[in-house]
Image: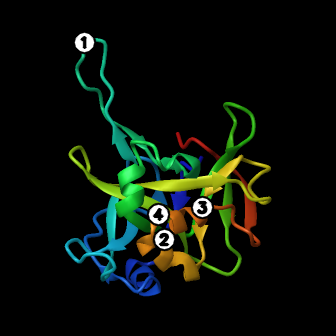
Amino acid sequence: MCNLYRMTRAHAEVARLFNAELGRIGNAGPEVYPGLPGLVVAPRPGGGRPGPLELRSMTWGFPLVLKGKNGQPLKPKPINNARADKLDGFMWRYSFQERRCLIPVSAFAEAEGERGAKTRTWFTLPDQEVFAVAGLWRDTPEWGPAYTMVMTEACQHVAGVHDRMPVILKRADWADWLDGPPDAAGLLCRPYPELMVVERTAESWVRR
């Protein structure tokens, strides 16, 4: 599952790439971790579907509220990945039917190596500095607008590191993911079929 990705291009440049208006960006940083803000392309609030697209920041992860031994709610846990074969489950069903989005990504990372010594392995596309990952979003009482990343089986380039990967959408499929019927959108949740660049690093997975 993906728990770290980069989005390193300027906000205005990303908005132009996705033919979107600039919305409220907030403090989305170049490296995005679960529970922190990231950039999302989605229909402008109140604009209907299909309608004008907007680039804005949301929290990465749907909040899962757990309770302690005394029954008091604990700090919410961000559920930042949604498996493509589980999109009909309660947590994802209505967002998949009504609130799909695009997540601009420059690279995503997976942990590789022995436990306690895992390093970061990055995956990029050779011909695209920014690509679109399939996402879902919803408003939450805990964090406001929040999004999750849709995951599918790993392609041949990712399989040596992890058995799942984000759903990467080709530009020709962006509109179908955002506005197409759920059955058609579900067919887009497949391993990326083209070349990817794998960069193994000595960076520690956990930054201390």
Q: Name the residue under label 3.
A: 189
Which residue extends farthest top? Answer: 70
Q: Name the residue under label 4.
A: 182
- The kind of residue on which mark 3 rests is Cys
Local crowd at mark 2 within 10 Å, few (<14), some, or many (≥20)? many
Label 1–label 2 contact, CB within 8 A: no
Q: Residue shown at 42%/87% (left/top)?
A: 16
Q: Compute the Cα span from label 1 to label 2.
A: 43 Å
- Taking 23 as reference, is 57 above or below it? above
- Taking 63 as reference, is 131 above or below it? below
Q: Compute the Cα span from label 2 to label 4.
A: 8 Å
Colour pattern: rainbow
Percent across and percent down for residue 189 are 60, 61
Label 3–label 2 contact, CB within 8 A: no
Q: Name the residue under label 2.
A: 177
Closer to the chain start, of discs 2 and 4, is 2
- The kind of residue on which mark 4 rests is Pro
